[in-house]
Image (cartoon, coloured by chain):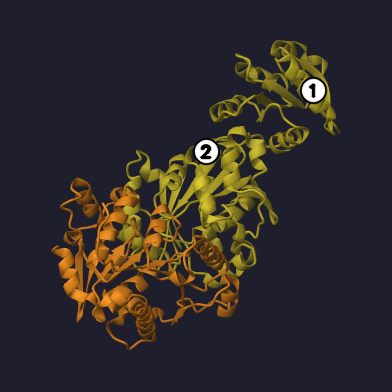
Amino acid sequence: MEEQGRRGNVITVFSTASAVGKTLVAVNMAAELARLGYRACLVDADLQFGDVCNYLHLVPERTLADAQKAAEADADTFDVSQFLDVYTCDNISFSVMAAPLRLDEAYNMAVLSVQHILQQLQFHFDFVVVDTTSAFSEMNLMIMDMSTIITFLGIVDFIPTIKNMKIGCDTIHSLGYESSKIRLVLNRSKSKTKIDLEDVERILGEPFYHVLSNDFKAAWDATAAGVPLVRSADTALAKDLRSLVARFTNNEVEDDSGAEGGVSSWFKRIFK
Amino acid sequence: MDYQVILIENNRLMLERLSSVIRATAGFNLIARYQQAGDALGQWAMFKPNIILLDIDVTGNLGLIPEFASAFPEAALLCVSSHWDAKDAAQIVKAGAKGYLVKPFTGEEFLEAVQTFGKSGMALGSEVLAFFSPKGKSGKTTLIANLAMSLANKSGEAVGIIDADLQFGDMAVFFNLEPKSTIMEATRDIKFLSPITLNSYFVEVPEAENIHVLCGTKKPEYAEMVDVASFEDMVRMAQSLFRYVLIDLPPGFNPISLAASELSTTTYVMAMVGGGYEVLHMKRALGIFEAWPDYRSRVKTIFTRVSPCTDEERRILEQELGYPVSAILPNEYLLVSAAANNGRMAVDIQPDTPLSQNINRLSEDIMGRRRTRWGAQP
């Protein structure tokens, strides 16, 4: 069943070191995209222990598991938009596809089902931002294959973390993607380290595309309050996150000249 | 002094083959050989063996082990079979044998078996401690490496670490090891291995000769080559090599973490205090283990980077979690990372820090539990 129409971008936030701030970056990317007027959807693909809803203080009414069940029950009438929650804060509003509530549901999510759901989301949104787990699982490989851009998030911490970043970086490059698809982003949330950024870049063999300032407190406060940092530009971290999204979207405008189709073509597609 | 060996092997050709291996191995003297166990039992008084190799593929020979053990109290009885069987292994050790060898063996394997089993015997009822974390970055590799040090120092027994965090295992980096073989090769070859040959897949830790590490795969894509059934066989076999088998698991529930938890005597569910949702994740994870009938005694919880690291704080965590918290570890980021960056362990470098003290306390708990579970075993 090959479906026609314009498909939105998929931006995946991935890392091979844990607790580097994937969810924080994913949440703020979706929020910033929404603030800029794009139709954005945030998908929590950390199926077992995802934190997207925790970060947004959202109690999801529907999840990926419900979407999977519905799609399996009747693929023809399946409407992915019925399984989204909406997050709103000030003038920012974006959709959220929550991770399954139950662990057994999460454990049994099929790669093909998630792929199908992501494809459906691409028809509805300009940007689908996907938060992932830190592993080269079948699920994550499928998501990366589908992605327009992979934000490979790193941290300068201690040697084991850097080793895993290096392995991750090499592995991701071995997957045959265009190098412009992979964007190395450094989150400087651990400033106590004695390891230099330049040394890490030398080990990785490439410079960071973007560096996020160290502001643990701002990140913590925003998470505790359940609001995205990019809501205001009064912290360095918020500014960095905003400019990361600005860089992504600028590239997007250059690459995709058909993007001007806008709402009307979207409506045509939905009601064809 | 040379080892004096008696060989009992029913198959005439195998008897010849094993005899020539033993004769060709320096330090060993073949003093008598039999095809029938009964002959050995009836004629033993003529010899003074230190090692007896008993063919247990012959029906009935398994039942003779106690008789051999009492007839030759000075000698180490090693059972020989054409295949490895974890159930048989446990049974023969209980009956009084020291170890288990798969035939045919080489001179090196024979020597290693004697060295490994000769003194303390094959481990019986060893503890399998599985370390599970809902999400990554739980501090479990730090804990396992340091706990292994502590257990090895305090008990003087053999400790094995299996790095089953297949894609991003850090154990080799923590101990600064350069493994020639990893969990991938060990599970791939397991059908052809016995404890002795499996031992050679583990790397000895240079600073601690009774700690051996089976390192994680060298590349993430090798992870899928580790099949679960072989992994289970490997863990069971490792139990006859080490008194304590510590398994570092990948985060979350997956076939490997579920299999290791199933095999464990104790599963530690771990999380690092930080983002604010660790207790929630741990609660959900515990929900999965609740299905075990012995859940409350077998599943223990640990929080790391607890600050302040006080009993009061532990009680608060317990209350939030609704489950006992077995250990809390303080934040010693600089100490731990400095140690790990240099391939050393915090418990060795600074034994007086709260981190080291709490890890030592945990290892005493584990040793205490072992004593109660296995009775008067030394």
- Badges 1 and 2, same chain: yes
Q: Is residue A270 left or right of residue A211?
A: left
Image: B228 above or below A156: above
Image: B130 above or below A25: above
Whether the residues at callouts 1 and 2 have beta carbons within 8 Å, the answer is no
Locate residue A150, reporting x and y percent.
41, 68
Image: A37 above or below A67: below
Locate residue B350, reporting x and y percent.
62, 67
Identify the amino acid type marked 2. Answer: Ser
Quarter of the figure with the C terminus of chain B: top right
Q: Which residue is mark 1?
A: B19
* Cα–Cα span, label 1 and label 2: 32 Å
Locate residue A125, reporting x and y percent.
24, 69
Among the 4 quarters of the image, the one containing residue A196: bottom right
The orange chain is A
Q: Residues within 10 Å of mark 2 (few under 14, many from 20)?
A: some
Q: Nearer the viewer, residue A191 or A148?
A: A148
Residue that appears at 63% across and 45% down: B158
Q: Earlier in the sequence, mark 1 or mark 2?
A: 1
Identify the amino acid type marked 1. Answer: Ser
Q: Is residue B112 left or right of residue A255?
A: right
